[in-house]
Amino acid sequence: MRHHLGCAPGTVSWGALPTGRSAPVLEVDSGDVVVFDTVSQEGLMPDQGRDPVAYFGAFGVPEAGVLDEAAEIAASGLGPVLGPHLVLGPVHVRQARPGDWLRVEFLDLRPRVPYGVISSRHGRGALPGELPGKPLVSRFCSLTPDGRHAVFAHRGGQALIEVRPFLGLCGVTPAGEEALGTIPPGPFGGNLDLRELTAGSTLHLPVQTEGAGFYVGDPHFAQGNGEVALTALEGSLRATVRLSVERPPAGGTLWPLVETPDAWITLGLDEDLGEAMRQCVRQAVHLLGEVAGMSADDAYLYLSGAGDFSLTQVVDIVQGVHCRVSKTLLAGPPGGGSGGRAALDH
């Protein structure tokens, strides 16, 4: 089955994640496809005037070029609480139970408008007290006609940003009755801000509540690893996603796991960046044991030679580190040859 879910005052919350008591806005079966029409919060925020028609009009966007849903949400009684992001959902997956995992396949991600915004505010970037020089600094970026790049205008001229759409916010409903803000990610996913979650990737999430309560938000046209100024290139996306219930991974890992056609990606999340790194290493060691049969010692050494560790983001209170492990390299030499002695211990 294929479903469509758009943003409206009745289908979104603003700044808070759903709880187990939240009424679902859509019910689906495992294996169903959902098309999410997301809306970026940029242009709707109070410090931007809460009027997307006027805000984007100042950059030359005609009223017809502003999404009707954005104007409707801005004019409604909704306002940001606990966090800034518009949250579309929750979606109830009928077969999902706590202890299961939800397989989220990103089939297609594409911009709904030909423009986006990068912002820094609240002293929340990587350099609080240094940058930005004003309480709010934003840059409006238009997409090139082919949609492959965004144009970043600056004092010295223009630069390009490669468009790689993904959802900064995607997760399952956290356990517990108290609503959490949308800023910090956690074992439920949420505001992961992982730029690898482009079309063709898969996110595996541990189900926390009955029906999973899947949600999306914070759509991005592009993001640099680290997301150092606070936001990515924010812009509304149409996201086509398949949701399937799956068995938990062997070994009982509790953290989200990402898979792309050519890599496995593990995550570490903590307010302390060093602890986030240690968590990510532990998860990667566990992964290599499961998918390649490595001992913990072998996996630890292999990651030191072949693991690609990166800062996911350093601006969401809970900071993120991710490790990319190539599937091709894990497969070993062509033809199954050993390429030398299998192991050396000193």
Image: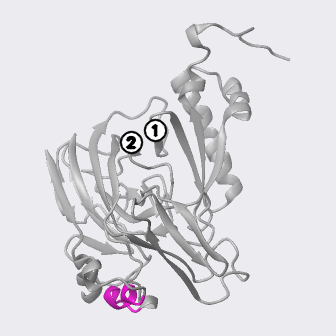
Q: How many labels sit on residues?
A: 2
Up the image or down, 339 lies above or below 58; here it is above
Up the image or down, 276 lies above or below 251; here it is below
Residue 176 x, y percent position in the rendering: 37, 61
Horizontal side of 44 relative to 77 (left or right) equals right
Residue 63 x, y percent position in the rendering: 27, 85
Identify which residue is drawn at 33% across, 69% down: 113
Residue 25 lies in quadrant: bottom left
Q: Residues within 10 Å of mark 2 (few under 14, many from 20)?
A: some
Front one among 198 and 218: 198
Q: Residues within 10 Å of mark 1 (few under 14, many from 20)?
A: some
Q: Amino acid at mark 1?
A: Thr
Residue 322: say if magenta. Answer: no
Front one among 327 and 145: 145
Q: Which mark is residue 59?
A: none
* Residue 24 visible, this angle: no
Identify which residue is drawn at 22% across, 78% down: 68
Tell me how far mark 1 sits from mark 2, CA to CA. Answer: 7 Å
* Residue 150 visible, this angle: yes
Q: Amino acid at mark 2?
A: Gly
Residue 72 x, y percent position in the rendering: 23, 83
Identify which residue is drawn at 38% across, 81% down: 80
Which residues are the magenta region? 49-58
Please tell me whether the stretch drawn in magenta is mainly helix, strand or loop: helix
Question: Going from the N terminus, do you reach mark 1 or mark 2 first?
Answer: 2
Residue 346 lies in quadrant: top right
Query: Which residue is identified by label 2?
Result: 200
Callout 1 touching callout 2 (CB < 8 Å): yes
Residue 302 lies in quadrant: top right
Query: Which residue is identified by label 1?
Result: 260
Front one among 184 and 159: 159
